[in-house]
Image (cartoon, grey):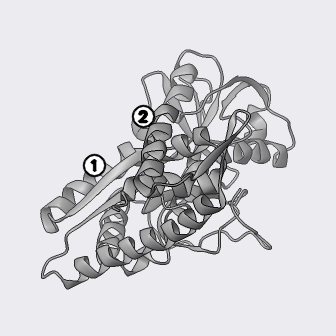
Amino acid sequence: MELSLSRLRMLRELHRRGTITAAATALHYTASAVSQQLAQLERDVGTRLFERRGRRVQLTDLGVLLAEHAEEILASVERATQALEEAGETVAAKLTAGVWASVASGLLPDALTALARTHPGVEVRTRELAPEETAAAVRDGELDLSFVIDYSNYPMTWDKGLERAVIAVERVYAAVPAGAVPAASVMLSELAEHPWIVSPARSHFGQAARLACQSAGFEPRIDHEVEEQATAMAMVAAGLGVTLVTDLGLALRPPGVDIVALGDALTRTVSLAYRTTTARRAALPLVIEAVRTAAAQKGLGADAPVPVQPDSLGLA
């Protein structure tokens, strides 16, 4: 009997998440593809691993037993990969990193170009996710590492099973229609009468923006909720409102948008999160150093401490 690692990974995700749809989403497959592969796994082992309960699939006792062994097998594969990387004369590794738009466009091109020049055996693949999802994907083994963020007024809750390295500290600015604010800096309270364009409240950026406005003494009138800084600034250019933007987002600014310093201090810390087991991989510090160097070249130092949220339990 031969067991496919990819099918064992699907079984593990089904055991963790409870439904084929959720497992498929986590693994970036279609639900039908996962269902077919799990059916093949059942044929491979020659015994029932699943049973239908209405529209749901539930693992049998043997299915649970194999899923538990799958955890050990996949962890062993990861350890073997690390051992092989460490045994080589040169570092050769493939890492998958979680990113979002501003780090993908603002940091990775320079970082990965430099890494390929100095360590051609290290290959970094990326997967774009919402910033709120990347740390959980690392914890669950879907990614090797991911970019994560903390705002000075809204630190993220942290999974103690993960480690992180600070990469950059960004300032936050007001992005306003050209000519709307003639001064070089502005207090948030001075923008209270403007319509706002912000990320949804479920996002870290959306929460940080709302809290900053509330601390300045007003509730922002939000006319438009959008996910990306580039989209928000395009709407600002059209005169539809004002928004907040970070250093890395400045590269996405279209014509017709003025960037104004905030008198209210607000910063964003960008870090790389990784599992404790991944920390032993020789390629990891090379990737961290390459991204840190790219950030430093843009004037975004990694010297500031990571904001701490007391009594944080688990991921948001």
Q: Residue at x 48, y 40 (%)?
A: 34
For the residue labelled by badge 2, is the local secondary structure a helix, a strand or a loop? helix
Apparent side of residue 30 relative to residue 239 in the rendered image (left or right): left
Q: Is residue 107 left or right of residue 262?
A: left
What's the residue type where badge 1 is placed?
Pro
Q: Quadrant of the C terminus?
A: bottom right
Q: What residue did someone put label 1 on?
A: 109
Give the quadrant of residue 12: bottom right
Pointer 2 with pointer 1, Cβ within 8 A: no
Q: Is residue 200 left or right of residue 108?
A: right
Q: Nearer the viewer, residue 6 or 280?
A: 6
Furthest-front residue in view?
46
Q: Is residue 243 above or below residue 63?
A: above
Label 1 sits on a secondary structure element that is helix
- Find residue 163 and name its label: none
Please tell me how crowded label 1 is: few (under 14), some (14-19), or many (20+) other residues with Cα within 10 Å: some
Which tag, 2 or 1, sits closer to the chain's start?
1
User: Residue at point 65% right, 55% down?
Assistant: 60
Q: Position of residue 197 (x, y in %)?
A: 66, 27
Q: Is residue 201 visible?
A: yes
**Residue labelled with disc 2:** 252
The residue at 46%/56% (across/down) is 9
Instruction: In the rendered view, tell whether residue 296 sits above or below residue 27.
Output: below
How many marks the image carries: the answer is 2
Q: In the rendered structure, which amino acid carries the disc numbered 2?
A: Leu
Residue 300 in the image: x percent, y percent?
Answer: 43, 60
